[in-house]
Image (cartoon, grey):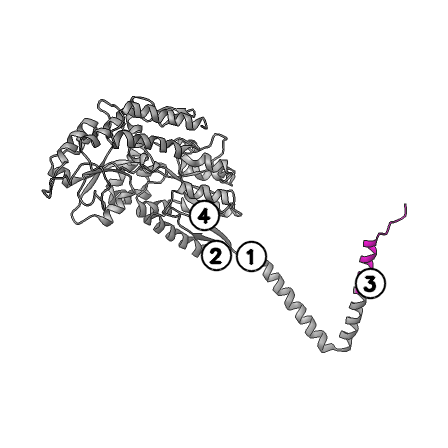
């Protein structure tokens, strides 16, 4: 077969011929003017050098990092981001705190839907993982180079396993846990003849609560109490009253088992009864209190986590003394007190254009040096194996003995169920908390039954 010559080929041949003609004419002019030839060659050389330099000088990668909005975590984020940026000119990190006005879960779900997620977020709540995954929002971190070598060297395997998704991937990197305990005002309890150990049981706690109710200013209304459970019905508030107490009362159960309701039981009824009694007997204020009631001496105890240590140290009045004990349990319970662990983890988002660079920064966040810095600034224990025995952290615990209590309690904690309906589930419980405990319009048994049925309906998609 002969060669076929189409129109495009003819056009290319003609363009080459014309270009060759132009080059020949340019060569003739350059031979006629040697000075022009030298200038032209120098110009061409300069352009080539600049072009090669531009190719070699790659623009730095920029990562966006969203930490929590609380002051201590922002301070930590600013410190490590500056140190990282100073030593990594090729990978720069831009820190943007999460909005304080909304829950992290709402912010991240909206960002996933809008395609505006950061590269990295350091406030990942395990209970919302299914929702993030459903939106294809998170990166499968176990596919990153050296992932398990790094994570297992830092974190106990059972903790990593607990945060491994059912498809076998790890979409959240275990970072830190905050065991919830009972903080108490040492001097206030002593002045009222209350032994902190008596707060270990519901009956002892209620007896101490009756003893603490006092009218200090003589206006006929109480202005001092032992404990002030919140009347706020926002879903996450239940994590720090009903849910924390339920984990303890049930010996470590969560709300669901194999995706089904598992809290319609005596433990939940006992918790609602305990909280209802506090409200019904007037052992707490029914409205919101102005300022920090614990630091102001209006209440003698509060359910909180280790993040409160730096806050109390910075804001407590002179002479204020506080300590921590485990949360109260139903009378007759035996064994260790199990509590809510309030875990928060770190994740790289699937939208990141630089997951490998993001992984390098995450490893930097979780380095031994920065885990120690994290403890020093926030007082939140990282998921680091043998933390209390690690010589690198010995000096910290010597200076901060109260934090050792949280590390000890950290062995006996539970998280939350991974459910895309998590917020709706806690909303349903919160509604019954308000009707039963705060308003006293339902018995604890009926309230638990109604909450359980509402959650069944939610899980069924009704």
Q: If you read the primary sequence from the N terminus, does the residue marked by circle 4 or circle 2 appear first? A: 2
Query: Magenta span has 250?
Result: no
Residue at the image position 40 percent from the left and 55 percent from the top: 82
Give percent across and percent down for residue 54. 59, 61
Report which quarter residue 287 is drawn in: top left
Q: Is residue 415 visible?
A: no
Say above or below: 250 vs 97.
above
Residue 17's label in the rendered image is 3
Residue 89's label in the rendered image is 2
Q: Nearer the viewer, mark 2 or mark 3?
A: 3
Quadrant (top left/top right/bottom left/bottom right) for the C terminus: top left
Q: Nearer the viewer, residue 7 or 173?
A: 7
Query: Contact (CB < 8 A) between labels 1 and 4?
Result: no
Q: Give the CA distance from mark 1 to mark 2.
A: 11 Å
Q: Nearer the viewer, residue 220 or 320?
A: 220
Query: Magenta span has 10?
Result: yes
Does residue 412 appear left or right of residue 8 in this picture?
left
Q: Give the CA distance from mark 2 to mark 3.
A: 49 Å
Give percent across and percent down for residue 166. 48, 29
Q: Give the CA distance from mark 3 to mark 4.
A: 55 Å
Q: Is residue 446 visible?
A: yes
Q: Nearer the viewer, mark 1 or mark 3?
A: 3
Q: If you read the primary sequence from the N terminus, does the residue marked by circle 1 or circle 3 appear first? A: 3
Query: Contact (CB < 8 A) between labels 4 and 2?
Result: no
- Which residue in the protein does label 4 denote? 361
Give percent across and percent down for residue 35. 71, 78
In the displayed image of the protein, which residue is found farthest to the front?
A: 441
Residue 40's label in the rendered image is none
In the displayed image of the protein, which residue is found farthest to the right?
A: 1
Q: Residues within 10 Å of mark 3 (few under 14, many from 20)?
A: few
Q: Residues within 10 Å of mark 2 (few under 14, many from 20)?
A: few
């Amino acid at each position: 077969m002969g060669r076929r010559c189409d129109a495009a080929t003819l056009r290319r041949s003609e363009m080459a011929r014309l270009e060759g003609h132009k080059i020949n004419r340019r060569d003739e002019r350059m031979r006629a003017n040697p000075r022009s030839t030298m200038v032209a060659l120098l110009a061409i050389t300069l352009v080539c050098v600049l072009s090669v330099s531009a190719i070699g000088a790659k623009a730095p990668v920029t990562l966006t990092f969203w930490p929590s909005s609380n002051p201590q975590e922002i301070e930590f984020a600013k410190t490590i981001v500056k140190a990282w940026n100073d030593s990594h000119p090729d990978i720069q990190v831009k820190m943007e705190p999460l909005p304080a006005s909304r829950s992290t879960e709402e912010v991240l779900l909206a960002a996933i839907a809008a395609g505006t997620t950061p590269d990295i977020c350091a406030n990942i709540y395990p209970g919302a993982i299914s929702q993030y995954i459903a939106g294809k929002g998170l990166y499968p971190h176990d596919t990153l180079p050296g992932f398990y070598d790094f994570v297992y060297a830092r974190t106990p395997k059972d903790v990593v396993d607990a945060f491994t998704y059912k498809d076998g991937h790890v979409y959240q990197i275990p970072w830190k846990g905050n065991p919830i305990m009972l903080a108490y005002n040492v001097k206030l309890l002593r002045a009222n003849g209350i032994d902190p150990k008596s707060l270990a049981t519901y009956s002892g706690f209620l007896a101490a609560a009756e003893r603490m109710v006092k009218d200090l200013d003589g206006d006929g209304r109480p202005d001092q109490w032992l404990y002030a459970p919140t009347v706020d019905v926002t879903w996450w508030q239940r994590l720090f009253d009903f849910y924390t107490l339920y984990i303890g009362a049930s010996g470590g159960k969560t709300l669901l088992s194999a995706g089904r309701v598992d809290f319609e039981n005596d433990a939940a009824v006992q918790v609602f009864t305990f909280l209802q009694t506090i409200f019904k007997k007037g052992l707490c204020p029914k409205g919101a209190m102005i300022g920090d009631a614990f630091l102001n001496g209006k209440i003698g105890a509060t359910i909180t986590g280790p993040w409160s240590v730096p806050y109390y140290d910075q804001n407590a009045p002179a002479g204020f003394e506080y300590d921590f004990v485990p949360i109260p349990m139903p009378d007759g319970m035996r064994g260790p007190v199990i509590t809510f662990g309030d875990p928060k983890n770190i994740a790289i988002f699937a939208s990141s254009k630089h997951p490998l660079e993001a992984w390098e920064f995450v490893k930097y966040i979780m380095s031994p040096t920065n885990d120690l810095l994290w403890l020093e600034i926030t007082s939140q224990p990282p998921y680091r194996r043998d933390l209390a025995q690690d010589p690198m952290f010995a000096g910290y615990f010597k200076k901060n003995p109260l934090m050792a209590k949280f590390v000890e309690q950290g062995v006996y904690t539970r998280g939350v169920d991974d459910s895309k309906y998590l917020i709706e589930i806690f909303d349903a419980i919160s509604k019954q908390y308000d009707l039963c405990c705060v308003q006293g319009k339902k018995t604890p048994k009926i309230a638990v039954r109604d909450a359980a049925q509402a959650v069944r309906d939610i899980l069924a998609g009704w």
